[in-house]
Every structure is written in C-alpha cells, then in structure tokens.
Image (cartoon, rainbow, N blue to C red):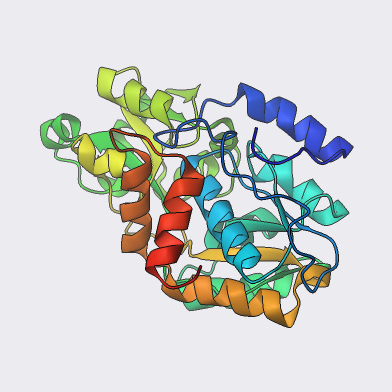
C-alpha cells in the first residue's frame, strides 16, 4: 500500500469511490509501491505535504514526480492513494486533508467557473489564478498539456468521413458515447458538446477515466465515440482518431500544481516550478507510454527515472 491513508472523513469517503474506479491503464496497481516515508525530513512546512491525485495513471505519476522531487530537497511528503476524480478530492483540498495535487488548467477553471470562456493557455491560466479559492493557489503552469478529446476508431472516421467534432454532430443521435461518469455533467463534457456542436448522443455509457474499459468499449464497438486524453498512448497504439475541436469546446489544459498556500514555501515553489519547467506534452506521451508498456512499471519507478534523467533528484 503506498503511503498511509489520512484519517479524515473526506479522504475515507473518497477512497470508497476510488476502490470502485476502474481506471489504471498501464500503471500497474496505482496503490502499490511508491510511498515515501511520511517521517523523512521535516521540510520548511514542518509537517508533511499531503499529495493527492486523481485515479488515472498519468495523474498518479505526476503526484509521484512532485513528491519525489520535494523529498529529494528535504521536504517531508505523504503521497496519498489516488482518489477517483476532482469532484471527490477537491473538498479535501479545501478542508486541508490534501495539500497538493497535479491539476489541469482548463478543466479546473471550468470546474470553478462553469461559464468561463477562455481557451488559450495564457488566458486560461490568468483566469484560473483569479478564481482559485483561498487557501489554494496555483504555481507555474507547465508546457505539458493533456486535453480531453472525442475519439473514434479509424474505421469509423473513414467510413463516415469524420475529422472533427463538427463533422460528428449530425451522427450523434445515432451513437453511443463512453467516458467517465463525471463527463456527463462537466461544462466541457456532454453539456458542452451539446451547446457548442449541437451534438446529443443516443446513449451514454459510464466507463472509466481514460482507462482500459473505455479503450475496450471503443475497440469492440460497444461505444462509437469516447472521451480519452490526448496524451494517452492508447490513441496511437490502437489507431484511434482524436477528432479536431475547431470551436474549442475543450480549453487549454496545461499541467499545474494546485497547492495550499500554507505549504507553498519558497523552497517548495522552487522545486515544483523546476519540475513544471521540464514537463512538456511529449514528456507526458513518453511517460504514459512507459506506464502502458509490456513490463508495466509502477508510477513511482517511472517518476524516479525521469527525475534522475532531468537532474531533479
């Protein structure tokens, strides 16, 4: 089991959800192997920084990258088991049972301000800084971007001459769409596709967060379109097509540390900003490819090797 569980009702409730989640992709058991001792080092903050993550491999990996980079500089960390989704972990950030999570600028902005209209990386980041509720703050955003995408098989795209979500819209009433439960209600999820593209699907299948259930459902035809992440190697590995989004339903989604300001000492900011400076979209693709590789290494192993390669350990 990776790290101890925080004895807080929010975390316990969220973990009940996480146990039922089916995400996990190629990262092996996200709860195994990867905890740093919560007693290692004291750091500037005095008590360990409790690091959470959403329950999908890339976010678990980013939490490991943050945690190991901080611990290498003597900051005490406590990497919590992954929690199902933003809706589950955000209350913990507000009540202090979680101190830090890897976030994505566009979806976080729309979570906090559903009517947000910003779409470019700089605009989204600037707007996000204004609406993040105290005591939370965001540190430097990385170049790395992982956006939601409407994905179809190559055969479907070819047969229906579909290259964009706009092309897909007339077919939506005949299609079954698959994705995580929360995509049904998020502003840029099903509601956004309906409003932006007049795309209303025949049926919605609740699956996992960019994980094996979604990939399998798309491959075997249980769904004809699905929500996957643009940095997911499953798109390339399976010959899927991520449809273009000409009307920018999905805003820029750069990886960014979301942290409790009480834990954001100068040292912590320096470490996390140094990590963000090294993260690119290609790095995410490469790291996710490792997580989904044949030997399926644990996220903590992939994180350590990358940090070492970048001189951050």
Where 212 falls versus 260 (above or below)?
Answer: above
Residue 189 is left or right of residue 242, and the answer is: right
Report the residue at 80% width, 48% height from top. Answer: 92
Report the residue at 60% width, 38% height from top. Answer: 185
Where 169 falls versus 175 (above or below)?
Answer: below
* Residue 126 occupies quadrant: bottom right
Camera-side residue of 200 and 147? 147
At which x and y percent is residue 38?
A: 76, 51
* Residue 271 occupies quadrant: bottom right
Query: Quadrant where the N terminus lies?
Result: top right
Where 305 falls versus 268 (above or below)?
Answer: above
Camera-side residue of 65 and 190? 65
At which x and y percent is residue 307?
A: 45, 64
Residue 285 is left or right of residue 32, and the answer is: left
> Is residue 290 in sight in this rendering?
yes
At which x and y percent is residue 32?
A: 57, 34
* Residue 75 occupies quadrant: bottom right
Residue 274 is left or right of residue 260, and the answer is: left
Report the residue at 28% width, 47% height from top. Answer: 243
| Residue furthest out toward the front | 40
At which x and y percent is residue 83?
A: 66, 38
> Is residue 168 in sight in this rendering?
no
Total numbered badges shown on the rendered structure: 0
């Amino acid at each position: 089991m990776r790290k101890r569980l925080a004895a807080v009702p929010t975390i316990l409730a969220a973990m009940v959800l996480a146990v039922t989640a089916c995400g996990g992709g190629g990262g092996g058991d996200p709860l195994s192997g990867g905890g740093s001792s919560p007693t290692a080092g004291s750091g500037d903050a005095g008590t360990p920084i409790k690091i959470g993550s959403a329950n999908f491999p890339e976010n678990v990996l980013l939490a490991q990258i943050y945690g190991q980079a901080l611990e290498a500089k003597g900051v005490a960390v406590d990497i919590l088991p992954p929690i199902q989704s933003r809706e589950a972990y955000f209350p913990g950030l507000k009540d202090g049972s979680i101190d830090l999570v890897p976030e994505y600028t566009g979806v976080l902005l729309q979570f906090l301000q559903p009517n947000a209209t910003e779409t470019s990386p700089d605009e989204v980041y600037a707007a996000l800084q204004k609406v993040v509720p105290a005591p939370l703050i965001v540190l430097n955003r990385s170049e790395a971007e992982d956006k939601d995408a409407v994905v179809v098989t190559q055969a479907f795209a070819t047969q229906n001459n579909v290259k964009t979500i706009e092309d897909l819209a007339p077919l939506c009433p005949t299609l079954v769409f698959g994705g995580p439960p929360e995509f049904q209600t998020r502003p840029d999820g099903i509601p956004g596709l309906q409003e932006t593209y007049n795309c209303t699907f025949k049926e919605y299948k609740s699956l996992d967060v960019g994980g094996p259930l979604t990939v399998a459902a798309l491959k075997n035809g249980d769904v004809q379109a699905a929500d996957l992440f643009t940095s997911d190697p499953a798109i390339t590995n399976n010959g899927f097509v991520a449809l273009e989004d000409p009307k920018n339903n999905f805003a820029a989604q750069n990886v960014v540390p979301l942290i409790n300001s009480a834990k954001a000492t100068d040292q912590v900011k320096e470490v996390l900003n140094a990590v963000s400076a090294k993260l690119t979209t290609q790095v995410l693709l490469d790291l996710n490819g490792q997580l989904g590789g044949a030997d399926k290494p644990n996220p903590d192993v992939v994180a350590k090797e990358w940090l070492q390669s970048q001189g951050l350990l």
